Each structure stands twice: as C-alpha cells, then as structure tokens.
Image (tube, rainbow, N blue to C red):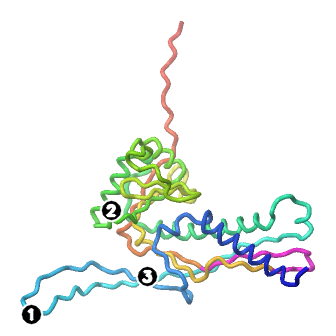
Amino acid sequence: MSVSVDQVFVKQFEADVHLAYQQMGTKLRATVRSKTGVVGASTTFQKIGRGTASTKSRHGIVPVMNLNHEPVECLLQDYYAGDWVDALDELKTNVDERRVVASAGAYALGRKTDELIIDAMKQASSSVGDYSKGLSKELILSALEALNSKDVPDDGRRFAVVGVHQWNELLSLEEFISADYVGDTPLTAGAEARKWLGITWVLHNGLPVTGTNRDCFVYHASCIGHACGQEVKTDISWHGERAAHFISNSMSQGACLIEDSGIVRLKCSEAVQTETQPATPQQ
C-alpha cells in the first residue's frame, strides 16, 4: 500500500465536508452580506449614510455629499465539530462511515453558521404582529410596508426566513403557490425557497421560539454581516492507543447587525386554531 494513501483519504474527506456544508449545511449565509478571508479576531463592516444631491452654479464646485461612515465591528469565534472513526468498525459496516461523519460535521458547522446569523437578526428593533395570530397576508404586507417606508432597496436582495408552521401557512395562500404569481422554476437545489412580492422566502427550523410564539424575519441582504476568517477545515489524525482516526472539522466565523432599519421581525403564533364542530342533532 502506498505510504501516501492517508493523504488521499484526507483530501476526499475534506472535499465531502466542503460539498455538504455548501449544499446542505447552511441556508442563510448566501442571503446576507458576507466577507471572507478575514485576518484577526474581528472585522469591520462600513455602514454608509444617505447622500443628498444638490445643484451648482456654472463653473462652480460640485457639492460634496459628506456621507456618514459608521463602522460596525463583527467579532469572529472558533467552532469545532469532531468524531472518532474506529478502524475495525469500518470493516463491519456496509455504510460509508467517512461520508456519514463528513456530512454530520458539515451539518453541525452549517447550523452554527445559521445560528450566528439568526442571533444577529434577533437584535432587530422593528416588528409587526403581537403573537396573537399566525402568519397571514396582512402581516406580510405590514412588514413590506415597514421596509418600504424606510426606503429599503427593492433590488431582488430582500429575503424572508420563516419556520415550518409559517411555511405551511404560506402554502395556504394562492398567491404564494400559484405559478402565475411566483413562477415554476425552483430557486435553489436542496432547499425550500420561493420568490414572492420581490422577496425570497426561505424555510428554516432554527428560528427563535418560546412556547407557541415564533419569530420570523424579513430583511435586506445588506443589513446583516457575516464574516469568515477560516472556511470549514478538516484535520484527520491517527491515534494508535484508540486504534481509530479522530476527524476534526473547524471554522472561524461571526455575524452582526449592520443596519437595523433593513430588517423587520414577524411575531407569529403557532397555536393550532381548532374549528368548532356543529352539534349533532339528536334523533
């Protein structure tokens, strides 16, 4: 056997981790403002104010907008996901243990990425609803009005993330399911996503919930910042005393709220409304 076979094993495993992380590990990273290759413990996202156009006299000096620049710091943290693979166990199973562990590690890191982004969303101060009703067309239009009133760009980069119960409520709206309104072309592979009202709707299981009170969010991609100092990296080491490989996946990432005016919290109820059945007449 070649002495470099372990390197082939490591490269194949690492490729599986990256593929699983990109395809099914994280749902929200592509919906926010992301910066990669960060060096250091933190990075800064620039929040730029609004400019004002003015006139000038002939041959006069062009007026300066004097844009306000407000830096927003995003702290990075290190995260790990590892597991043991016993050498003899691999001989006794009919599944690809390497691929199973690779997927599990990628999913764990992907969930952590989305958790960081959702934690940043939870800082939003603007909200609609009061947890007394489920997700409805009226609630959605109220959130849309809130974004429009703050001049949030309608440039195709508006997103909404909702829970499973709210997704089912959306499926009860003809405008959301009819191809006449949303088209019939899937937006992404391996994820529930649909575009309606100029917003890309994404299904996610990790949104904040207290009892039957669920928080969903409608936001513009530029209002949330995600920073990555190290993409998912895999390290595999052999431990003779355990007769097993230890497979470690790690990453360094962080998220922050950049622009509070660009996100609206939807306060939804997940309480099941039971319809009252008419009394059966006695014979």
Q: Could you say whether the residue bearing mark 1 is in a helix, strand or loop?
A: loop
- Say which mark, if any, is on residue 275: none
Residue carrying label 2: 147
**How many residues crowd around disc 1 within 10 Å: few (fewer than 14), some, or many (20 or more)?**
few
Q: Residue at x 40, y 84 (%)?
A: 71
N-terminal label among 1 and 3? 3
**How many residues crowd around disc 3 within 10 Å: few (fewer than 14), some, or many (20 or more)?**
many
**Disc 3 from disc 2: Cα separation:** 21 Å
Please, what is the three-letter code of the amino acid marked with disc 2?
Leu
Q: Residue at x 27, y 78 (%)?
A: 50
State yes or no: residue 183 in magenta. no
Residue carrying label 1: 59
Q: Could you say whether the residue bearing mark 2 is in a helix, strand or loop?
A: helix
Q: Which residues are magenta?
A: 237-252
Residue carrying label 3: 45
The quadrant where residue 240 appears: bottom right
* Residue projecting furthest to the front: 2
Q: Are the two marked residues, 3 and 2, in contact with CB atoms closer than 8 angstroms?
A: no
